Image (cartoon, grey):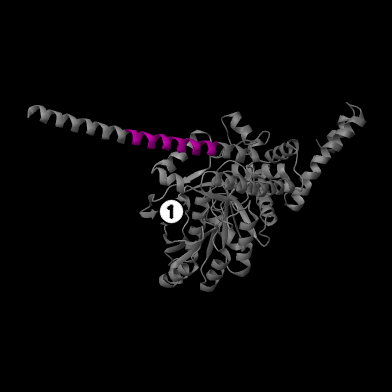
Amino acid sequence: MNGENFALSEQIVSSSYIRQGSQARRSHEQLIRLLLEQGKCPEEGWSESTVELFLNELAVMDSNNFLGNCGVGEREGRVASSLVARRHYRLIHGIGRSGDIAAIQPKAAGSSLLNKLTNSVVLDILKLTGVRSVASCFVVPMATGMSLTLCFLTLRHRRPKARYIIWPRIDQKSCFKSMITAGFEPVVVENALEGDELRTDLEAVERKIEALGAENILCVHSTTSCFAPRVPDRIEELAAMCAKYNIPHIVNNAYGVQSSKCMHLIQQGARVGRIDAFVQSLDKNFMVPVGGAIIAGFEESFIQEISKMYPGRASASPSLDVLITLLTLGANGYKKLLAERKEIYSFLVQELKSLASAHGERLLHTPHNPISLAMSLDGLEAKSNGAVTQLGSMLFTRQVSGARVIPLGKEQTISGHTFRGFMSHSESYPCPYLNAASAVGITREDVTLCMKRLDKCLKTLKKNQNVTTECLFLVSVMSCFICSVNNVSRILLLNNTG
């Protein structure tokens, strides 16, 4: 409805009522105007009606929704199912063109506008959460691993002679495979054990650089968010080292946007040294379906270079999902979620520490990890070899998801490389343990219920182990009794024979 149509409506319905409706319409349009003017996440979240109005306005700008459109090409935004069309708000053309994921589509002005606005809003959020000097970013419809691969492939053109990627070890398969898929040889640097924490061995990293030669190294591939007892890499020191040797630096910031500490590390790393790009997941940080990531950096030309490396058009679904989410939450809503996550982290620390103490275990001291925690399972391991893995199975069948149980001595071969002590980020971590994390969206009820079920599982395992011990004792006693009876029988038989 525009001004002319509202004027015509006054001939049908009382003008006072129409003016009221027109004012209500303008309040929606004012929010949309501010978004287009500023390109930032609104302070307060929009209502669903405003979001849907905006998306419908975008959709009618795409050629597949033109009244009387006649399409004779091979890609005309045709959709067989009306359910699928509604699921995507009739934004069917995707984003980008065959040569550049960030390019404008002539016959999809609405989808192109959605793509540009999403990247702008996400950039605003990255600044809001701590990386204030970030220059550019874009949403890519791939998860973190493949997005890292895209970064490595882009660097190949800048450093054609490079063969190696220096990688402080983190036991997550997609991180390792992202380098293999790009055609490079990962150089695994074992972490240093400091107290309970596994931290970056900076001296080992520098030795590898000097041994291999800086010109043969594509980049250093570091990590922020990770499972305890590993903690975020020493990003500042690595960034300074990369600047010293003129080596690119790619940071895997998978679920680090929700942590002010992880974002601060990236900001400081860029300030004191070199960070070329940092990659983060959409689903882990913004509670949207899996399938998207944000590639960001401090040099706009390099981020554009990465976007141009993406071959072909791309799905708009991840961009649409995160834009809807951020418009609905608003900057204040997202900041509130992050504050709640931090509060529940402290609650989880208290609850897990108390539970560990009750079962003769301890909460591992990992103060540099702002998201993940670990509880030792020494007592469980001592009582039974299979008890640790059994605990993991018990938790899963009792609908406790996300808790990771890490036994000792596990080996895993990935693309020809064997990791000893796999999942523990170390060849020989001192004890088995259980992981739990306070990630964005978690509630106090999640923590309370998890602790209740974990406590019950530990008690059940302890009871079963005591029963097993008693059974073994009884078997031993019966065996001795049977042996005694047999001996007595032999003596009696010999006496009778004599």
Question: Which residue is at 17% across, 29% downward?
Answer: 489
What is the quadrant of the C terminus in the image? top left
- Which of the 4 quarters of the picture holds residue 217? bottom left
Tell me where residue 4 appears, x and y as whole percent: 85, 36
Secondary structure mostly taken by the magenta-highlighted segment of the chain: helix
- Which of the 4 quarters of the picture holds residue 20? top right
Circle 1: element type: helix
Question: Which residue is at 71% across, 41% downward?
Answer: 328
Is 307 part of what is drawn in magenta? Answer: no
Tell me where residue 385 appears, x and y as whole percent: 38, 44
Question: Which residue is at 53% across, 73% downward?
Answer: 244
Of residues 254 and 92, the one nearer the viewer is: 254
- Which of the 4 quarters of the picture holds residue 124? bottom right
Mark 1: give few (<14), some (14-19) or many (20+) Cα within 10 Å: some
- Residue 400 visible: no
What is the quadrant of the N terminus in the image? top right
Q: Which residue is mark 1?
A: 181
Magenta range: 453-474
- Residue 435 visible: yes
Tell me where residue 305 appears, x and y as whole percent: 56, 59
Is 457 part of what is drawn in magenta? Answer: yes
Question: Which residue is at 43% across, 72% downward?
Answer: 213
Tell me where residue 356 appears, x and y as whole percent: 54, 46
User: What kind of residue is marked 1?
Assistant: Thr
Total count of labels: 1
48 to the left or right of 107: right
Of residues 354 and 420, the one nearer the viewer is: 354
Of residues 208 and 388, the one nearer the viewer is: 388
